[in-house]
C-alpha cells in the first residue's frame, strides 16, 4: 500500500480532484481518502512516482509515508 499525507486537502472537492488525479495516473489503483486525517491510501499502485507527481500537478503537496 502507498500512503501520502496531503495537508492541503481540505474538502470533498479536493477528495474528488485527488481521486481523479490518481486514477488518471494509474487506472488500476484503488484510492481511499481520509479527509479528516489528510491521508490518501492507494492499493494496487504500479507507478508510485507517477501517482505522487499527478497529485502534485493537481495542485496538492503529497508527502510519502512509506
Ligand atoms: Cu477542497
Image (cartoon, helix red, strand yellow):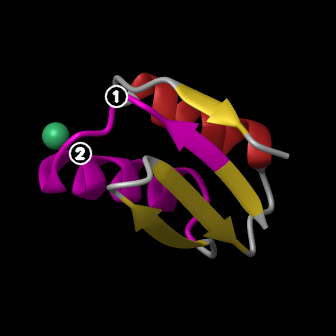
Start-end of magenta stretch: 4-27
Q: In the rendered image, which quarter contains the N terminus? A: bottom right
**In the drawing, does residue 23 fall left or right of residue 12?**
right
Residue that mark 1 sits on = 8
Q: CA distance from mark 1 to mark 2?
A: 9 Å
Query: What residue is at 37 percent from the left and 48 percent from the top?
Result: 18
Q: Dividing the picture into quarters, in which one does residue 42 lie?
A: bottom right
**So how many labels did they put on this image?**
2
* Residue in view at x 16 percent, y 48 percent: 11
Q: Quadrant of ligand 1?
A: top left
Residue 19 in magenta stretch:
yes
Cβ of mark 1 under 8 Å from ligand 1: the answer is no
Say whether residue 45 is magenta. no
Vertical position of residue 9 compared to residue 11: above or below:
above
Q: Position of residue 51 (x, y in %)?
A: 63, 44
In depth, the one of 60 and 29 nearer the eye is 60
Q: Secondary structure at mark 1?
A: loop
On whether ligand 1 comes within 8 Å of the CB at mark 2, the answer is: yes
Q: Extreme right residue here?
A: 66
Q: According to the image, label 2 marks what residue? A: 14
Residue 62: x, y in percent?
56, 31
Q: Which mark is residue 50?
A: none
Choose the circle earlier in sequence order: 1 or 2: 1
Is the Cβ of the residue at disc 1 closer than 8 Å to that at disc 2? yes
Q: Mark 2, residues whose alpha carbon is within 10 Å: few (<14), some, or many (≥20)? A: some
Relative image position of residue 40 (x, y in whole percent): 52, 55
Choose mark 1 or mark 2, whichever is in front: 1
**What residue is shown at x 51% (from left), y 70% (from top)?**
31
From the viewer's perspective, is residue 51 above or below residue 16? above
Amino acid at each position: 500500500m502507498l500512503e501520502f499525507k496531503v495537508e492541503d486537502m481540505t474538502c470533498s472537492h479536493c477528495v474528488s480532484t485527488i481521486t481523479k488525479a490518481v486514477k488518471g495516473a494509474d487506472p488500476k489503483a484503488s484510492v481511499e481518502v481520509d479527509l479528516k486525517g489528510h491521508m490518501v491510501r492507494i492499493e494496487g499502485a504500479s507507478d508510485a512516482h507517477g501517482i505522487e507527481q499527478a497529485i502534485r500537478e493537481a495542485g496538492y503537496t503529497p508527502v510519502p509515508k512509506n
